[in-house]
Image (cartoon, coloured by chain):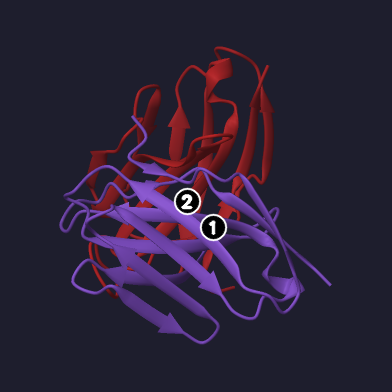
Amino acid sequence: DAGITQSPRYKITETGRQVTLMCHQTWSHSYMFWYRQDLGHGLRLIYYSAAADITDKGEVPDGYVVSRSKTENFPLTLESATRSQTSVYFCASSERGSGGAGDTQYFGPGTRLTVL
Amino acid sequence: DQQVKQNSPSLSVQEGRISILNCDYTNSMFDYFLWYKKYPAEGPTFLISISSIKDKNEDGRFTVFLNKSAKHLSLHIVPSQPGDSAVYFCAAIEYNNNDMRFGAGTRLTVKP
């Protein structure tokens, strides 16, 4: 199906484990983003990518690693999960970088991650 | 620091009436503002946006107003419909900066 998908939709893991959240988009958008949503904070940018092999930090990057070997995929890895990383994670993509008309970000359905 | 603030966590209005959602920001470098709508178990979807060179943008039942001197924007929904019940996020961004900042969201309930 066309669009942006995330997997898994729900994940429970334990403190210290590595977990990878997947994001796939079929629009060939150049830009991809990872956000986390926490109560009282709205969405906060973790990392973004302007193109394959180009990534950059957002507002809250600590504890996360990203890669982008292919335009359509943008996995997010928690190398050693902590309880504070319990959150809902959203992936998004846009044709161009944010900053003006036409740069609308399209969001995936989210992954709810619980770290015990 | 939260650069974009939505001070009302929730809002309830009657069907057919106006809904007004408010948003304040602190960073004067923001020059583009957006509203996203989010239903449960779904990702946010873009609703409407406004550039800092404008003070109003309208799209059907949705109008966004920007007051730069007060660093305030608002979203008006007229008339409100039950299907508008959702969480609304205000977002802001500087040109050529990819770090879009979101408010905490306002949950709108439109009662039939």
The image shows a total of numbered marks equal to: 2
Q: Residue furthest right?
A: B112
From the top left corner, tell me how far across and down residue B18 is, in percent. 62, 73
**Res A29 seen here:** no
From the top left corner, tell me how far across and down residue A98 is, in percent. 27, 60
- In the figure, A64 relative to B103: above or below? above
Give the colour chain B carries in the figure.
Answer: purple
Query: SS at mark 1?
Result: loop
From the top left corner, tell me how far across and down residue A69 is, in percent. 31, 49
Dots 2 and 1: beta carbons under 8 Å?
Answer: yes
State the mark number for residue A66: none
**Res B111 seen here:** yes
Distance from disc 2 to disc 1, alpha carbons, whole Å, reads 5 Å
> Mark 2: which amino acid?
Cys
Residue receiving disc 2: A91
Q: Residue at x 24, y 43 (%)?
A: A55
Give the colour chain A carries in the figure.
Answer: red
The N terminus of chain B - image quarter: top left
Q: Chain of mark 2?
A: A
Q: Is residue A17 left or right of residue A91?
A: right
Q: Nearer the viewer, residue A5 or B42?
A: B42
Query: SS at mark 2?
Result: strand
Q: Nearer the viewer, residue B98 or B37?
A: B37
State the mark number for residue A108: 1
Q: Earlier in the sequence, mark 2 or mark 1?
A: 2
- In the figure, B7 relative to A12: above or below? below
- Please rate how many residues cluster around mark 2, counting C-alpha atoms within 10 Å: few if below 14, some from 14 to 19, many from 20: many
Q: Residue at x 51, y 87 (%)?
A: B60
Q: Residue at x 26, y 62 (%)?
A: B32
> Mark 1: which amino acid?
Gly
Q: Chain of mark 1?
A: A
Residue B74 found in image quarter: bottom left
